[in-house]
Amino acid sequence: MASRTARSQTPSWPRRARVRPLGLRRHPLAQAVSLCLALGTLGAAPAYAAITGTTTVSGSETLSFGCNIFSGGTLSIDFGGSLSTTDNLNNLAGGTLGNAGSLSSSYHLRNYGTLTNQTGATFTNEGTLANAAGGALSVAGDLTSSGAITNAGTLDVAAVGQVLGTGSFTQTGGVTTADGLLLAAAIDLQGGSLFGTGTLEGDVTVGAAATLAPGHSPGILTVNGNLALDGTLVMEIDGTAPGTFDGLNVTQGISFGAGSITSIVFDNLFAAAAGMSWDLVQGNAFSGVGNINYQVTGLGSRYTWETYDEPSSGGGFHLGLRVQDAPEPGTLALLALGPRAAAPGPLTRGDRWPGPRTPRGPESPAAAAHC
């Protein structure tokens, strides 16, 4: 029987496909499916396309598989170009996703880097658009969302920008600057801050950990809807003329929750005087005004202040602040002894000692014994 030569049994491992980045413009996105990078931690999909250089979309493309834009990588959609994504698109920290044409996402688009929707561009979100902590999302064109938008990073809606649609907007941290239109079925600020001089369209909730600050020192913010304020409202005052102090205009009702804070900050360069007043908040109806905790800074010790909520001549109500002269220190001491002590004229014998007096006259046994 012929003998066989013994051979070493080396395990046969499947060969790993060579990974090539989409770093050159000459590679169309349609070919990227063969250039996958296995990153199982980023989703259920077994492989993701890797963009490490610059990839430009000039025509019409569909991305039907996961894609990661790595640090230093750029995915750019030219004016006239169109990109539709039906799977995960992750713009990682240090990556850039720029849209000057048309971008449509029907699944998850997560931004950890820089995402810009330029003037004249259109961005449609039918899934989830998540701007993560550290991410920067700027909207100068139209962003239409029927899905969910979440923000924990920096979101800038420019004066010419619009966020439209029937979806939801939730902020858990970070900063939103709304100088244009931010429209959603519900605007829920759970954390972070929102500034701006634009319009919030829809009912707005400001949670206990969130801050609403109209303007940019100063300015006016409009809410077309109801406002539920459980967090902090910051209003700045730099003068008395229109445009020199913040304003919040709410077309429907405003409810102030228990523990809500209204912080009114006077600019150090502005010299306030007694008799000055400011209508800061305008609403169709107020509720929970007694829950407001006021914090006034920058006014100085010469003056004191009071707040008021009154009917507005144009309808509805306004909430404001009025400056008054602070009482003289001596007056404060007299007021501590009671209103009679602060009144002009000599004190009577019975007024010299606070509290009950010893009876004087025939009814007093001590006085009758003395007589």
Image (tube, helix red, strand yellow):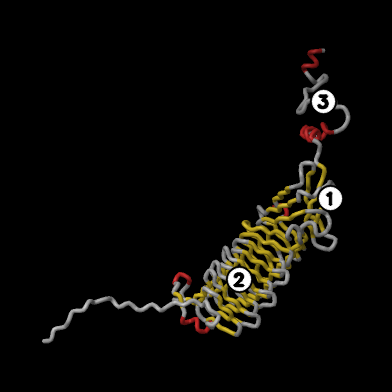
Instruction: Decide if residue 98 is in sight here.
Output: yes
Q: Quadrant of the C terminus?
A: top right
Per the model, the C-alpha gap separating discs 3 and 1 is: 42 Å
Q: Is residue 248 above or below residue 63?
A: above
Question: Element type at marker 1?
Answer: loop
- Give residue 154's position: percent from left, percent from top: 62, 64
Mark 1: which amino acid?
Answer: Met
Mark 3: which amino acid?
Answer: Gly
> Which residue matches tag 2?
115
Determine which quarter of the picture holds residue 201.
Answer: bottom right
Per the model, the C-alpha gap separating discs 3 and 2 is: 79 Å
The one nearer the camera, 252 or 93, is: 93
Decide: few, some or many residues near mark 1? Use Cα within 10 Å; few <14, some 14-19, many ≥20: few
Q: Quadrant of the N terminus?
A: bottom left
User: Image point 65% across, 76% down: which residue?
Assistant: 144
> Which residue matches tag 3?
350
Q: Nearer the viewer, mark 3 or mark 2?
A: 2
User: Image point 63% across, 73% down: which residue?
Assistant: 167
* Disc on the earlier residue, 3 or 1: 1
Image side of residue 170 versus residue 312, left or right? left
- Give residue 180's position: percent from left, percent from top: 72, 69
Contact flag, marks 2 and 1 (Cβ < 8 Å): no
Image side of residue 272 versus residue 230, left or right? right
> Which residue matches tag 1?
276
Instruction: Decide if residue 164 is in sight here.
Output: no
Contact flag, marks 3 and 1 (Cβ < 8 Å): no
Q: Nearer the viewer, mark 2 or mark 1?
A: 2
Question: Element type at marker 2?
Answer: strand
